[in-house]
Image (spheres, rainbow, N blue to C red):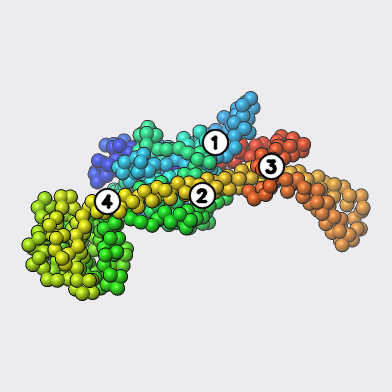
Amino acid sequence: MAAANGFVTSLSANNYCSNTNSANNLKMDFCCNALGIRNSSSCSVAYFPVRGRNSCNNLRYKYLMPETRSFRLNPRCEVVPNAEIRSKPSSLSALELLKTSAADRYTKESSSIVVVGLNYRTAPIEIREKLSIPEAQWPQAIGELCALNHIEEAAVLSTCNRLEIYVVALSQHRGIKEVTEWMSKRVELLQLLQFLQDDVVFYLKGMIISSVPVSELRQHRFLLYNKDATKHLFEVSSGLDSLILGEGQILAQVKQVVKTGQGVTGFDRKISGLFKHAITVGKRVRTETNISTGSVSVSSAAVELAMLKLPESSHANAKILVIGAGKMGKLVIKHLAANGYKRIVVVNRTEDKVAPILEELKDVELVYKPLSEMLTCAAEADAIFTCTASETLLFSKDQVQMLPPAKSQVGGQRLFIDISVPRNVGSCVSDLDNVQVYNVDDLKEVVAANKEDRLQKAMEAQTIISEEVKQFEAWKDSLETVPTIKKLRAYAERIRASELEKCLSKMGDDLPKNKKKAIYDMSLGIVNKLLHGPMQHLRCDGNDNRCLNEILENMHALNRIFSLDSEISVLEQKVRAKVEQSQKGVP
């Protein structure tokens, strides 16, 4: 199936990976307008349209610059000598049958907003990472989705915790089927070709097969339609659907969807309106409920507690020591960096776990020290975070008592925050006068209180979201009258033009231009004034007193009165145009 920019693929996803580096199994096929790369051992063939050609032993081959593209795979596996690109079979006959059917779905079904998604609740990371779409590929993905027969608009929200495809589907059932199959068969080529001119052997390098069977995808996906899809996106942008309730990063990611979609064909009125409204909702929820305040993880609570206990004047110069660079240690370091601490000493058994953190936090000075220097580092530190898996104490009462007093700038007390289980700091250390010790149970109380507070704020946020969903749905539903407005204006324009031509023909050819213009302007004025009333009763911005049902009743009445329904339905026209376009091979 042709997927993008004229590429036709028929690759065997299951067999290809084991033969990627086998040069002897790769051969070439040439035809009049395409280059084929064939893997004889796995029965796979890929055809690429020829753009530039060179001659070599009476053969013509092309250069392909390394680039990133996405493809949808044809599941058939066959090798055909001198294969030709075949167009998809026509679906117009099916449309004709639907048109004449007693139950014409296209005239009875309106377009729907649909979300097909996977998130941390429904799919494991092994599935999510295969389907993840890098931000740089979002515009291309939108184009591929909108090339599907029943998809009119699209947007992609892909993060570490979710992949959600939002579409305006001309048919719910067909649209979901097409999007699911598209998600299942995405293939990413990081580098297409590297060829050796000596024997004209081609290598495919860096091919990543991201195929997930449709049956498996169906087990993990979730589907939401119209109002439910709208509500879901508003909850996502508000942080109510996040792993950490109320987190703020997701709103920035929703904003990035809008930024990336600007000017992209397919990111059009309904979908862009939905995401822009979601940004407004996310901001309103955070402003009115303060749902993002308060730590809800042990690591963030540990840093928050340290900032409360250390004098504010000492925050810029406080000496921080983190013992352990595992998962919890890394999170503590990240939260410290996010709160402005620029120099952190990290004690760990080996340096290999510290180096990746240093690469990630380039604006922070991380000083690595081996475990043997732990007490020396502790003597210089104002706040010490312990987060190791050690089953023995790292700090006993005697060891801490031997440490020099803390600086006067931090109140003369050294702060120990022990988030290890089992504990790294002895319980009797807290008996010392110049030491404050907090363990994970102390932090859990803070986290639990903050979580309870966020749950209460989430309930308040749902009230806001319900209001915003109603506003957006009113705006979206009012767009259903747009085709009627266009058809009514076109109907009136045809009558005006016909009657104007008759009038001018009766008045003779010698009629001055200024009088012709006056008659023309008068005809426009009459039509506009006659249409003003009906048009006003078809428009709705969600803020007037007329309910949506009244607007839609007016629309149906005008359709009956002026026989506007006799024309081919708008949805059928759109589907027919897409099918004809795909027949011609237009991407």
Residue highlighted by disc 2: 464
Residue 149: x %, y % from top left: 53, 39
Q: Are marks 2 and 3 in contact (CB under 8 Å)?
A: no
Q: Are marks 1 and 2 in contact (CB under 8 Å)?
A: no
Residue highlighted by disc 1: 171
Separation of residues labelled 4 and 1 (CA atoms): 49 Å
Residue highlighted by disc 4: 444
Which three-letter amino acid code belongs to the residue tagged 4?
Answer: Lys
Q: Which quadrant would the N terminus be assigned to in this image?
A: top left
Answer left or right for 474 relative to 399: right
Q: Earlier in the sequence, mark 2 or mark 4?
A: 4
Answer left or right for 539 relative to 424: right
Residue at 12% x, 52% y: name it: 390
Which three-letter amino acid code belongs to the residue tagged 1?
Answer: Ser
In the image shown, does 364 or 46 lie closer to the viewer? 364
Which three-letter amino acid code belongs to the residue tagged 3?
Answer: Ile
Name the outermost residue toward the top.
102
Check disc 4 and report its element: helix, strand or loop: helix
| Vertical relation: 469 (above or below) 351 | above
